[in-house]
Image (spheres, rainbow, N blue to C red):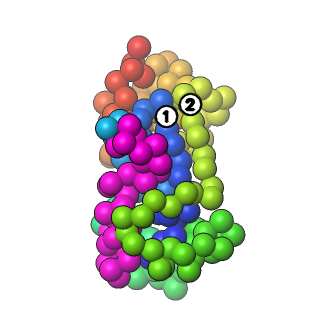
Amino acid sequence: MCLAKWSQVTLQLHTGMNHSCHHPTLHPISKKEILRDPSALHNTRYKKLKRKEMLEGKRPSECEYCWNVEDNSDRYSDRVFKSSEPWSWEIKDEIIGSNWRENINPKYVEVAFSNACNFKCAYCGPQFSSKWVEEINEFGAYKEVDNFNSFDSQATPYLNS
């Protein structure tokens, strides 16, 4: 399993999304869940169900990147690296002994309040970088198979405006 699902979170407050790893896609944070329990910013029902799968020895499909790396090479995946980070490793026993329904406070928190950014890193995208928005408005999206950085592929329609 990957301890990152419990120990770290990236909150994209401007889109209302979160994730605990950059490989799976972001998932929405439910306003209803937050009103009931503010820790749902990290401990979403969606994420808890993925944790449940891991605690049961299953491989959540959203984590296939790491499983593919490990199953098809002699390399360690980010799952191993993220799980061995101090903020994860120090609570490993607590996580392993936890009930999937429990709320776990993340030890590593990254928060984005908007997409204002002076960079346009290749691994990022317009929903996270205003510089990407400027470039796409001027030159158009990169010609890619999955339209990774096109406005059409983003869940945040405000980027076009």
Residue 13 versus residue 99 in the image, above or below: above
Query: Where is mark 2, residue-wise?
Result: 113
**Quadrant in which the N terminus is drawn:** bottom left
Observer-nearest of 17 and 122: 17
Q: Is residue 51 magenta?
A: yes
In the image, is residue 38 above or below residue 9? Answer: above
Viewer-nearest residue: 41 or 14: 41
User: Quick check: can you spot residue 59?
Assistant: no
Picture residue at 60% right of the left edge, 50% below the top: 109
In this picture, is 106 found above or below 124? below
- What span is in magenta? 33-60
Q: Label the magenta part by its dominant secondary structure.
A: helix
The number of numbered discs placed on residues in the rendered structure image is 2
Q: Residue at x 54, y 75 (%)?
A: 94
To which quarter of the image does residue 111 belong?
A: top right
**In the rendering, at what x and y percent does residue 134 appear?**
53, 21
* Residue 38, position as x, y percentages in the image: 46, 43
- Taking the view exactly as shown, the residue that stands out farthest to the bottom is 74
For this rendering, which residue is in front, 98 or 30?
Answer: 98
Q: Secondary structure at mark 1?
A: loop
- Taking the image as shown, residue 153 lies to the left or right of residue 102, namely left
Inspect this view and state whether residue 83 appears: yes
Q: CA distance from mark 2 to mark 1?
A: 5 Å
> Does the segment drawn in magenta span residue 53?
yes
CB-based contact (under 8 Å), mark 2 and mark 1: yes
Callout 1, which amino acid?
Leu
- The local secondary structure at tag 2 comes to loop
Question: According to the image, label 1 marks what residue?
Answer: 13
Label 2 crowding class (10 Å Cα cut-off): few <14, some 14-19, many 20+? few
